[in-house]
Each structure stands twice: as C-alpha cells, then as structure tokens.
Amino acid sequence: MNYESKELHRLVEEKQPNICQIVAIENGKIVYSDEWNNYSKEDCTHVMSATKSIVALLVGIAVDQGLIKSVDEHVISYFPDYKVKRGEKTIYEVTIRHLLSMRAPYKCKGDPWTKVCSSDNWTYASLDFLGGRKGITDEFKYQTVCIHILSGLLYEVTGMTTVDYANKYLFEPLGIPQHRNYYAETIEEHKHFILDKNPKENIWFSDPNGLGTPGYGLCMSATDMAKIGVLCLNNGVYDGKRIVSSDWIKEMTRPRVVENDAFRGMSYGYLWWIVHPEDGIYAAIGNSGNVIYVNPKKNIVVGITSFFNPRIIDRIEFIENELLEK
C-alpha cells in the first residue's frame, strides 16, 4: 500500500465522495491520514450505528467494575420502578446478552422512532416494546432506537450519564476529547443533526434526561475512531494501560451467526459486526460508511468518517479492495 498516494486521495474524491476522514494504523503507527470535504483532522462526524460498538465497550467496563454482575442477568431487574404492561410476560426473560447480541424480542417491526423519541422517558418507552407473544426466539433482530434500554441500564448501575461515564472511563484514557450531550428540542433539529453534512463538535445525541443514545448519535473524528480500534486490537490495553478486560474483548468479538443474508453474510458479536470470522476481522459499522475496522492478523486498524448518504451501507469492500491494496 502506498500510503502517500495522491491517487488514493483522488480515488476517494471521485468514487467515495461522502468520506470526510481516513486514518489507518499498522503495527501501532499511523501510516495513512487524510481528509476531504473541507474537514480538518480534529472535526467530528456523526458516526451513526458505530455508536453501538462504543456502548458495548462501556457495558464491558461496567462488567469489569462489578457494576453489572453478568450479561445473563434479566434486564427488567435493573428497572424496579418500571411498570410492565398488562399481560406482558416475555420481558421478564430478556437478558442483557439478548440486547447486546441483537436477539431481544420486540413488539415492533422496525424502529419506533416517533413513539420513543417523542416520550419523556426514552428508556421506559423502549421497554414498552420489549417482549411479545412469541417469547424468546433467539432470532436476530437489529434495533437502533429500543436499545436505548442499555443507556438507561448504565445509568442505573453507574449513577452517571452515558457521556460522563464514557468521558471518565473510555475517552479520557484514550486521549479522546471530552464529549458533551446534545439534545434536539424539535423533530426538525433531530433530522438536521442526522442529515447535516457539515463538521460536528465532540457531542453525543441524548434524550431529555441526558442519556446518550446508544444506537446512534455519537460524533467522533477518524483519529478517535482509530484509537478505539487500537484498544480492541490490543485486547483492551491502550498505551500500556488496561481500559477493559481482554475477556470482554474476546467475548464481545466472538462471532454469532446471523441467520439470513440481509447483512452481507456477516456474523455478529456484542454490537460489533464480525466481518471475517475465520481471520478474526471485525468492525463497528455505521450507516453512510462510518467504520472502525480491526484486522488482528495484519495488525491493522482503519477509522473512516462520512457524512450522511443513505445509499452507502458500509465501507468494508472499499477498505479491503481499495485502501489496503494500494
């Protein structure tokens, strides 16, 4: 790979026009870093569903701290003040593991954006959708809105908002700038946050109670995404300091087969996609091509940020067939 290649810059400009930043790290050193679309190295982009993978690390840190005893604990046990809907029984069987592996049952076909995001308590509104008459089917069901339950759960065990917990135990140890909450007062502001192509600050989209959305909403630079990747590549250690246990990284990236081909044949871990199980390659993947790509075999990490383009699902092919082949 020619990391100084002007050809690569032009290729991105012509064929991947919504990319804002790329940072590639090989054997612990930054070997490629570039920006497009008037973004600077420090600017942030909304990384969409790659947010989920950051939350998986936060859950792991809470497990390491003993605040969560086991991912096999029942979710509802963490919300003693929540009143279960009449006749709902399945919710009592749902575990934290079900949420992390996208195998929790929900009483909705897609993401109930309006009902959750217009409520006063997004956690409880999400719990209202958890369960159903089919019981625990262990069926893979990808959710973005209703996993807000995880932010509520983290608050219950830590007493800290999502962003405060992340700042103290993940971002600061990695040298990632402190983040703050961003709350949209109106539907228009919510849409603008997602659709806007301009650089963003170090913010995390939050609910009215200050809990960061775990399914989307985190804004990061490619440099900071790459740091997350290096942490995972090094089995939870960054710059000689243990941030999260190696046991958690191993369990978080253990491949679980997704039963249909809707997700390009990839497997799933705990809120991380397992791209090539045979080679241990995994990734945080967000809509529009936001990616943290981790290849332990080649000791490579790639962070890519991109502004909103709904036609682009992921950038795995670009990373493997274009970026790493240059």
Image: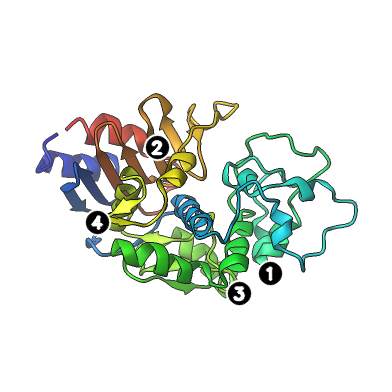
> Where residue 154 sits in the image (x, y, percent)?
57, 63
Residue 239: numbered disc? 4
Q: Say what amino acid the circle numbered 4 marks.
A: Asp
Q: How far apart are marks 4 and 3 (CA)?
A: 34 Å
- C-beta proximity under 8 Å, tags 1 and 3: yes
Question: Residue 24, located in which quarter of the rendered image?
Answer: top left
- In this orientation, which residue lies closer to the viewer: 322 or 213? 213
Circle 3 or circle 2, nearest the eye: 2
Residue 209: numbered disc? 3
Q: How far apart are marks 4 and 2 (CA)?
A: 21 Å
Q: Say what amino acid the circle numbered 1 marks.
A: Asn
Residue carrying label 2: 282
Question: Mark 1, residues whose alpha carbon is within 10 Å: few (<14), some, or many (≥20)?
Answer: some
Circle 2 or circle 1, nearest the eye: 2
Mark before the other along the chain sequence, 2 or 1 = 1
Question: Residue 177, located in which quarter of the rendered image?
Answer: bottom left
Q: Distance between the residues labelled 2 and 1?
A: 33 Å
Relative to 9, is 100 on the left or the right?
Answer: right
Residue at 29 percent of width and 54 percent of height:
238
Mark before the other along the chain sequence, 3 or 2 = 3
Q: Say what amino acid the circle numbered 3 marks.
A: Asn
Circle 4 or circle 3, nearest the eye: 4
Residue carrying label 1: 121
Q: Distance between the residues labelled 1 and 3?
A: 7 Å
Relative to 38, is 117 on the left or the right?
Answer: right
Circle 1 or circle 4, nearest the eye: 4
Mark before the other along the chain sequence, 4 or 3 = 3
Question: Mark 4, residues whose alpha carbon is within 10 Å: few (<14), some, or many (≥20)?
Answer: few
